[in-house]
Each structure stands twice: as structure tokens, then as C-alpha cells.
Image: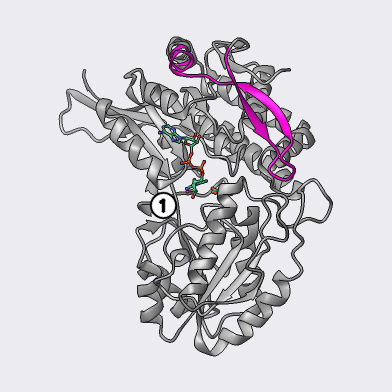
Amino acid sequence: MHNLLYINGEWTGESLNKLSVHNPATGELISEVPKGGKKEAAAAVEAADDAFRTWSKTTAYERAALLKKLYGLMIENEAELAELMTREMGKPLSEAKGEVHYAANYIEWYAEEAKRVYGENIPTHDSNKRLQVWKKPVGVVAAITPWNFPAAMLTRKMGPALAAGCTVVIKPSSETPLTAIKLVQLAEEAGFPKGVINIVVGSSKEIGEVLLLDSRVRKVTFTGSTEVGKILMKQGSETIKKLSLELGGHAPIIVLDDADINKAVDGTIASKFRNSGQTCVCGNRIYVQSEIHNKFVDALTEKVKELKVGDGMEEGINIGPLINKAGVEKVSSHVADALEKGAQVVHGGEQPSEQGNYYIPTIIKNATNDMLMMNEETFGPVAPIQKFETIDEVIRLANDTPFGLAAYVFTESISKGTRIIEDIDFGIVGWNDGAPSAVQAPFGGLKESGLGREGGHQGIDEFLEMQYVSMGI
Ligand SMILES: NC(=O)c1ccc[n+]([C@@H]2O[C@H](COP(=O)([O-])OP(=O)(O)OC[C@H]3O[C@@H](n4cnc5c(N)ncnc54)[C@H](O)[C@@H]3O)[C@@H](O)[C@H]2O)c1
Ligand SMILES: O=C[C@H](O)CS(=O)(=O)O
């Protein structure tokens, strides 16, 4: 099967100009994909709008059956999907296999949630009336996804949208379109009717304008940078789009003096270095209380030195390449800025060689709040450590950011942990846990990290409208 666009049940786009997909580890050309634009986006919206009339009338059980078939096909194709992800995005194969299951589990979870969309009976004030709340699918959904989790960020949207009875137009990142196209191929194989699922790859500005400005698109669900999220919010206001925004983060990791050092080190590594530090929930700044500071730095350094850097297709690799040269340049500039402002490199702090988009997993100490990496997403394998004295101080430091996605607290004290978590403004908190994400839990941020939640029973509400019905009898 070629890598094409999928619109109204047809694989199309052969005659269009192509965009190239390269392996970030080797630079090799993996595949070419048609570069779609306004025309293809408009055709996809048309197809999704037509299909909505029938798809929205299917039963929850019919939709659940198709989602379960797609789940089964994803698991059957785990190896191919994982290799595709590693080759187009760079993450180690072991992480890519994990993402296939994470992504498939969103499909399975929402196959069941489809059957639990309940309305309400409201106690009437008038014996001649009956009051009810009916739930209905919102309509045509545009799903715009990032490159760092090419499968999971798509199924976290596609799963609930389809389960609710919506139709979808997918716009994946041009860095990693192949995984998304493969998932749509599997959806076609599962038997989803034509027009229910459509995918358009290409000019994000052109495609985005169509998806955001066409009134037939009733919902836009976006995962990506806060900068782009703000653009989409402005565009969506033209037709009052329902919006879900899963945006950037800048997670603090807080380690108190009474922390279990092993939990704190293992949790920091899980949070910081997963996907080579290219996740929205990565710890971006590490605050360590003064008494435990040196012990924590030594223990973390010892573990980080064991992380192996290389091509994610090789056995035993923990840190793959960053997505592209720009990613490496951003990490290097953040490290250089920190060193200029007085930080010290404990381990790493450079590329292993000029070849490939690799960066050595890095530990930096004596970080201070004026450094770029303490304020902007580094999106790379760099762990800056700043010492603190009091709980009030670290709550102020943690909250001093426009972001509010994830945060991590390592303490064995129930009272201290509760006090900190109550006072920090983040949508997701790992308490002695560096990997909190789970399909059954609501994922999302506060402040400039986004709007709405994905995952959990809350995630399907983003694709439903409620209708209040007052019935005279
Ligand atoms: N909160 C979350 O769940 C979450 C998850 C993953 C990544 N992210 C964030 O995403 C960012 C990294 O991903 P990225 O580099 O792909 O982000 P990005 O914002 O550059 O791109 C995300 C998607 O938006 C598209 N896009 C870009 N400009 C657009 C426009 N004007 N109109 C329509 N679409 C447009 C891109 O092509 C891509 O498909 C980081 O900030 C990371 O924190 C957040
Ligand atoms: O990068 C953002 C992803 O949502 C991370 S997670 O795999 O969902 O934790």
C-alpha cells in the first residue's frame, strides 16, 4: 500500500507534489507522501460531513464493534507500526512498541465508553412537562496531531470521536505522517465506512485554514505547541468552534529531603528521558531540597551515565535521535545559555558526534530561574537541577510559569505531598511517579497548556453536545 491521502474511502493524491519523510537517525529517505492543500482539505470535510449523516445514526454497539476490530488490527500489526514510528520519529523500538499498545488501548477504552454515553431525566416542576438532557455527537471533527507520539496522539482523539458518532479529518505532522496513514489503512481494513475517517497531509497553514474556518467542522482537537494552539484559537473563533487544546508544558520535578532517593531518581529518569526528552510532560526543571541535593545529583548521574545513545532500531538503545537538526540546535542553545549564566555540566552537555541528531543525556546543576531552559520547553534530554530550602519557596518556583500541564513531587510525607499538590497549578501530577499517563485517566493542562481533557470518561464528553428537551405531555 502506498503512502497516500485517504478521502471519502479513496486513496488519492498520486498527482500531487510530494513531501519527503526522513529517518532522523540516519537521514535516509523513508518515503514520500502527497502534499495536500486547501482542495484536499475541503474534499475531506465534504466527505466527513456527508458521512456524518449516517455514521451518527449507528448504534454505540456498531461503533464499538468496529473500534474493537481496529484495536485487534493494531495489536496484530504491532511490529510494523513500531518500526514505522522508530524510523520516522527516532524513538527507541522498545518505546515505539509501548506506544503502539498505549495507542491501541485508547481505541479499546473508547470502544467501551461508546456504550456509556448517558442522558438525564430532570425532576419536573410542572406535571404537564418532562425535562430531559439528550447527548448527541458534535459533528465533523478535525484532529491535528504532533510528531512526538505519532500513534497515541491520534488515537487519543480518533477513539472518542468515532465512539461518540463523529466523523474525522486527520492532519498529522508532516514530520511523521506514515504512522498515521498506516493507522487509517488499518481502520479501512476494520470496515469503517467511507468518509467516516479521512487523512490529509501537507501544508499545515493551508489545511489548517480550511479546517478551522469551514463551519461544517464543529470541533477541532489539537495537540502541539502553545504557539500554534493560540493561532487555532483565534481562527476557531470565526465559527465558534468547540476546541480541545493539548499544548506545551514545562513540568517541575520537586524532590523533598524526605524523598525515597530511588523513587526520585527512577521517576526523574522516566519523566525526563522518555522519548529522548521530547514529551509534553517531561520534567523540564528539577528542584531538589538542600539536604538531599548532593545525594540526588550523584545517584541521578550514576543512572544517567548508563543510558545508551544511538539508532532506535538497535537493541538496548535508551536515547534515540532528536526529531531534526533544529531540535538539536535548541537543546545546544539552552545548554550554552545555562553555562553562560553560571550553571555547571555534571554529565553530557554536547552531541556525541556531528553525525545524526543525537544529544548525550545531560545533567546540569546550579541552575537558576533566569536561564532559558528553566522557562521554555527544551524538548531534549537535559535535566537542569536547582537547589531550594523551603516548601513555600518551591511552590512559588514551580508555579512561576505560563504552563500548567504536568508536575512531579517526590516525598514520603502525606502531609507535605498533599500541601504541595494542592498549591501547585498543573493538570497532571505524578506523586512518587514519573510516568502518570494512562488511557483511563483525564490528560490535560491548565493555563497556557491547553483546554479540555483527553482520555478517561471525560475524554468522550469533548465530542458530545447536550440537548435540553422540555416535553409537554
Ligand atoms: N499536551 C499534550 O498532550 C502534548 C502532546 C504532545 C506534544 N505536545 C506539544 O507539541 C509540541 C511539539 O509538537 P510539534 O512540534 O508537532 O508541535 P507544532 O505545534 O509545531 O505542530 C503540531 C501540529 O500542528 C500542525 N500545525 C502547525 N502550524 C499549524 C497551523 N498554523 N495551522 C494548523 N496546523 C498547524 C503541525 O503540522 C502538526 O501537525 C511541544 O510543544 C509539545 O509540548 C503537547
Ligand atoms: O507528549 C505528550 C504525550 O501526551 C505524552 S504521554 O505519552 O501521553 O504521557
Q: Residue at x 49, y 23 (%)?
A: 168
* Quadrant in which the C terminus appears: top left
Instruction: Classify mark 1: helix, strand or loop.
Output: loop
Q: Is residue 203 magenta?
A: no
Q: Residue furthest right?
A: 315
Return the residue at label 1. 445
Q: What amino acid is found at the position of numbered circle 1 in the picture?
A: Gly
Up/down of 138 relative to 193, above or below: below
The answer to whether residue 434 shows anywhere in this view is no
- The magenta span reads 16-44
Picture coordinates of residue 464, whole percent (x, y): 39, 30
Q: Nearer the viewer, residue 246 or 437?
A: 246
Judge the density around disc 1: few (<14), some (14-19), many (≥20) Cα neighbours within 10 Å.
many
Q: Residue at x 48, y 57 (%)?
A: 377
**Could you tell whether 6 is left or right of 122 in the image?**
right
Q: Is ligand 1 closer than 8 angstroms to the Cβ of mark 1? A: yes
Picture coordinates of residue 248, whole percent (x, y): 45, 51
**Could you tell whether 421 is left or right of 26 in the image?**
left
Q: Residue furthest bottom?
A: 291
Up/down of 358 relative to 466, above or below: below
**Could you tell whether 319 is left or right of 448 in the image?**
right
